[in-house]
Structure formats: C-alpha cells, structure tokens
Image (cartoon, grey):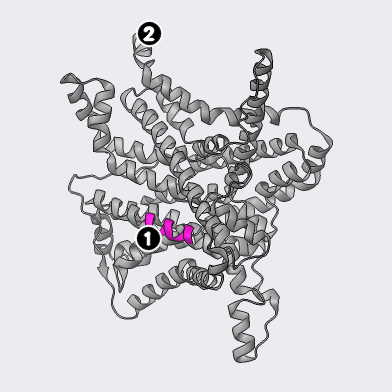
Amino acid sequence: MNWYAMKRQLNGWAILSFIALLFIVLPGVVVLVELFAPVNDNWQHIREYLLPRYVRNTLFIMLATGVLTTIIGTSLAWFVTVYDFPFRRFFKWALILPLAIPPYIGAYTYHGILNYTGVIQTTLRNDFGITVNQSYFNIMTIQGTIFIFTLFLYPYIYTITRAFLHNQSSSMIENARILGRGSWDIFFTVVIPISRVAIIGGVSLVLMEVLNDYGVVKYFGIQTFSTAIFSTWFGMKDTSSALKLAGTLMILVIAILTMERLVRGRKQFSYATTKVKPLKPRPLNGWHRYAVLGYVATVFGIAFLIPFVQLIAWTVLTFEQVFTAAFFRLVWNTVSVAFIATVIILVFALIIANYTRLFPSNMTRVISKVTTLGYSIPGAAIAIAVITLFLLLDEWVLKAALALDLGQTFVFRTTLIMLIFAYVIRFLAIGYNSIESGFEKVGKSFTEASRMLGWGTVQTFFRVDIPMIKGAIMSAFILVFIDIMKELPLTLFLQPFNFSTLATQAFKYVSDEKIHEAALASIVIVLMSGLLIFVFHKVLDKEAD
C-alpha cells in the first residue's frame, strides 16, 4: 500500500474503528500476558491433577453436543425446507423457539420435572403405583448436560442451514431426482456437501455457547473450564491461576477456530446461471408425512413445549410470592442494561463495518476478523480479564488522584460501566456480522453516487446508508438484545452490588434450591426472547421476499 492510500484510510472512521477495537483487544492481552507469568503452587496443582479432567470433560461435552445438534438441526432444516407436511408453516419458525430458553433455565426445569418430587415420578407413584429407580431419571450427569445443550442449541444449526437451503437452486435436487436418486441419497450426497459451510458455521456457534456456559455445568456439578475458572477465582482467591486457566481456554478456542477453517476448506458452491429458483416444498403422502410430522413435533415438544408448560405451572404456583415491586426492578434492570449495551454495540458495529466497507484492504480485513473474536472468547475468560483490567485502571486513577491531591476518586469496578464493557466485548461480533451482511447487500454504488452529488461521508452515512440497511440494524438489535438478556456468567460475576437481572435472580433461586420461585423470572425471559425471535423471523422473511 502506498503512502497516499494509507493516509486516505487514516481518517475519522479509522480512528473510531481503532478505538472500538481497543475494547476487544485489551482484556485478551491481559489474559495472555498472565499466561506467561511465573507460576505458583496452586497452578502447579491444577495443571498436574485437575487440568486434564477439565480438558477431558469440556472436549467430550463439545464433541457429543456438536454431533447431536448437527444431526437434529440439519435434518429439521431439510424436512422443513424440502417437504410439505401438516403444520409446516408453524414449525418453520417454531423450531427456533428453543433459543428463547437459556440452557441453564432448561437444565433446572428438566431436573425439576425428572427428580423424585417431579411430575413424572409423582404421577407414576400416585396414579400407577410404580416406583422407579431414581438413577434412571438422574439428569445431573455429563450425559444430561449434553442432552440439555443439544435441545436448546440445535436452532443455531437449524436456522443457518434452513436459510442456506432455502436460497439454493432447486435444479440440483431436481437433477438428482431425474437421475434416480432417492431422498436420503440426495440428502447425503448433494445437500450435505453443498451445505457444509453453513453447517460448520452453525456448529462453531454451538461449540462457543458450550464453552461459554456456566449455569448448566455449575448446577449439574460438572467440572469444566468455566466452573474451574470461577472456583479458582473465588474459592482459592487466586487471580493468577484463574487467568492462566482463562488463557488456556482461549488457546483451546483458537485451536477450535483453526480446525473449523481447515475442515471448512476452500470448497465453495456457486450458481452456474442467474436463473436461480428457491426450493419449493414437495408434498409428502401416506405414512411419510406423519412420520416427519411426528419427528418435528417431538423435537419441538421436548425442546420447548414441555419446559415452557412446566415453567408456567411453577409460575402460577409461586406468582403471589414472587411478583412484588422488587420483581419490577429486576425487569427494569434487565431491559435497561441490555438496551444500553445493545445501542453501544450497534454504534461500534456500524462504525467498523462502514470503515471496512469503504476502505477495503489487508488492514481492514484484519480489523473485521478482530471484531468477531469477542464472541469466541467464553464469558468466564472475559469476566476475569475485565475485572483484572478495571482493577488496574482503578489503581492508576487512584495514583493520579493522589498525585494531583484530589478528593474522592471515581471507582470503575463497582459500576455498571464494567458490566456494559464486558457485554460490548462479548457481543460486538453478533451486531457486526448482521450489519456487515446488510452493507454487502446494498454495496457501495449508492454511497458513491451520494458523494458525487456533494454529500459528505457522515451525511451520506446517516441519510443514505443507514436507511438502506435498517432491516439488518433491526436484526442486529434483536439478536444482541436477546443474548444480553439471557447472559449469565458475565452478569453474575460483574454486576454491581444490589443489582440483579432476571437471569441472575433465577440462578440465585435455583442455587438456593428454590426452583419454583425461579419460574417467574425465567418465563419472562422466555416470553420476551420468544417475541423478539418471532419478530426476527418476520424481518428475515420480509428481506427474503
């Protein structure tokens, strides 16, 4: 790149983008620097006796969850996209609804359903006189953890794969049928290869969510990296060892992302003609339509309907006890902090995405990659990195105040600033990816025409670019808002004193064995998330049309 081109890129957009990226990079630097610091006795003990178990449990849960969610998500996307069966239009969007139930809420709900006093065993004892060995219903195991993650994370693969298949040319499948291939043969030899990129993208999101989880593994007593980091941090009071665990986890994430790139490879499938027709559902007849309907309905029932109905029953049981003025404060805290963080994320995402669009180069490609790293870092690693960073910041502020002979000093680590900062790091990638896809659809021709007519970059940005990508901005807002509202690890460990959200309050109730009392907070999260998911689905359908 020559000097003129470099100078052209070092404008206001570039400065704002670099400031935004500074938020992403600093916590990671803190963790990686500590990873190479001198070790203590606690870390030697963890590395020798405990770390292999953390790695083994984490990898096993990730592998099993990845395989099962791939099977369920891909098969559901295939059935809903290719075939027409009863209630298909309903299940088309309803199969996304399990995303509205955070895995930790699903975990305690299913534990309440299956335990000794749950509805299943109670019904068997009281109505049928059957007493079943409790071990048959014990869900608080690694296998139960995989079951929970599979149920509530498969929509990531389902949504991405269904969108990909919907936009594919029908000629490929029609030609395969003409050549005498059967449905299953077409699925494995045509659909899976052309959908590989979409499937791998969905699986990577599932694996990142598994690594980020703290609520499920903590409640089930499974030792993974997330529980290890927080137990070392709060139990041993050893920040150094906790940071080393976080750094090890980040290295594992980098390895997974690298493996994803290698597995995905450079294979791409593009259209050979501009006359592309989306797939039209093919009617199913006979027992096939009821078999597909039964499979789809079973997944929807287990992943959403059963836990949703159970939460409603528990809510009715404890409504008068829990529905107080304090509950309204929980709702306000949840909505307000999620809204503020989402707006900040969208501002940063718009700035970075617009800069990388207007000035494409190797530097902007690096910026776009760094922007998406935050979502790959688990919440446990972000939490301890952010609090360590803010402790250092408070020390610098205190030293500056003493040097300048100032009075009371503002402390950052006990405010919402730290929590919102962590939200921005964690979820900037979601907002950026949505907005970047919006910019890719509209291109640069309208922006260049506006500049030729005399409008400046900022004026064009607000009066031309933003109105054209308002659908992408709305989608980004919905996705980020839902994820922040459901987020547990960051909120649980970075929230200020006397500040709780619906997610943390539900988890506290569950930790105190008050499962029924946690239902109201949980059902509000599910209802708000479900409503926003429905709106998001309508936005996507409108853009597709």
Residue 205 appears in view: no
Residue 278 appears in view: yes
Is the residue marked by circle 1 packed among few (<14), some (14-19), or many (20+) residues within 10 Å?
many
291 in magenta: no
Q: Which residue is nearer to you in this view: 501 or 47?
A: 501
Residue 248 x %, y %: 67, 38
Residue 313 x %, y %: 52, 73
Residue 362 x %, y %: 41, 23
Q: Main secondary structure of the magenta part?
A: helix
Q: Which residue is nearer to you in this view: 379 or 530?
A: 530
Residue 132 is labelled as none
Q: Which residue is mark 2?
A: 3
Q: Is residue 29 left or right of residue 44?
A: left
Is disc 1 placed on a helix, strand or loop?
helix
Residue 77 is labelled as 1
Q: Which residue is nearer to you in this view: 203 or 219?
A: 219
Q: Amino acid at mark 1?
A: Ala
State which region is magenta. 524-533
